[in-house]
Image: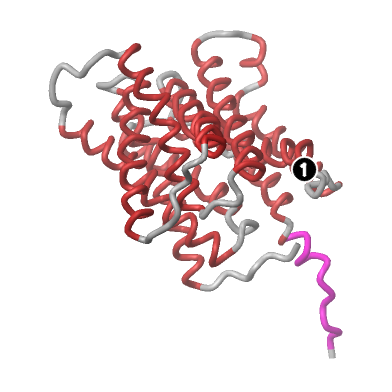
Amino acid sequence: MTQKSLSPRAWAELACLALIWGGIFLSVRIALDELGVATVVAHRVVWAALILWGIVLLRGLPVPKDARTWGAFLVMGLLNNALPYALMAWGQLHIESGLTSILNAATALFGVAVAAIAFRDERLTARRLTGVTVGFAGVVLAIGPEALLRFDLRSLGQVAVLGGAFSYALAGAWGRRMLSHLPPLTAAAGMLTGAAALALPAALWLDGLPTGLAAPATLAALAYAAVIGTAVAYLLYFRVLKMAGSGNLLLTTLLIPPVAILLGAWVLDETLPPRALAGFAILALGLAILDGRMWRMARRPHPPRP
């Protein structure tokens, strides 16, 4: 399958999407200074779902009414929103937001492996296997091999983030199998509704009812995470998908960590160990191999010199 060439507009919107998602890690970390993990997740999915359903209705898109589709929404909301949001937010309590973004990039590696198992047309070619292997080597380096041998909170935080990345990969396979017949915006609104149905009771059970108005910085962080980082990001994601194709969306995985690392250093005074940065460089190489465009450029015949 050939990739679409990227126009300047597509590049701009792709970069904008990476900036938005790169900022999610900072906004979630700020909100966690005052609120519990479940409450942050609940705010993010509830408000984003309401916004997207409003747009669905304004555009006159069909609203599913069958129980099978709503059951699929519930599973998709668990795998793509409630569970990974919670795991990654909990992980951010114990590791840097920049490192969280690096480990989140493993979603693409898990996605290739899960798709190869779930779908016949997603064969694990030699190039894909090489990309996944190199990418996971970068993940291991970013974590630190010694972290695999101990179970302190920092190690568990990194494992939680990787668990969230794996959940995203499962969601990709589930969405393709169960929701591909729906308009993307309807599917996004539905899965966020499924996530809200899970996150709201969890927030009330684990964190209880709010006792007062949160601080302005917390409210701003929640607004960014729900409105910009989720609702607007989904709208932009579907625009870029239509404009640039799914293959080019892998580039956002490469662009998000530098944004999150810089924001973490600037706002939170985070400092990542050199090992984490080297691990991201190797992970980025693995993602570039999966992307394939550098390989095709290297194999492209050059015109003979005069």
Where is 210 relative to 179, above or below?
above
The residue sitting at 54% across, 51% down in the picture is: 182
Residue most extreme to the front: 66
Q: Is residue 45 left or right of residue 105?
A: left
Where is 24 relative to 162, above or below?
below
Quadrant for residue 117, please give it: top right
| SS under mark 1 | loop
Q: Residue 46: where, in percent of width, then height?
A: 33, 35
Q: How many marks?
A: 1
269 within the magenta span = no
Residue most extreme to the left: 212
On the question of residue 20 being in view, the answer is yes
Q: Quadrant of the N terminus?
A: bottom right
Q: Which residues are magenta?
A: 294-305
Q: Between residues 13 and 146, which one lies in front from this camera angle?
A: 13
Q: Residue 14: where, in percent of width, then height?
A: 49, 59
The residue sitting at 78% across, 47% down in the picture is: 122
Label 1 sits on residue: 119
Q: Between residues 240 and 121, which one lies in front from this camera angle?
A: 121
On the question of residue 274 being in view, the answer is no
* Amino acid of disc 1: Phe
The residue sitting at 43% across, 38% down in the picture is: 192
Q: Residue 138: where, in percent of width, then height?
A: 67, 35
298 within the magenta span = yes
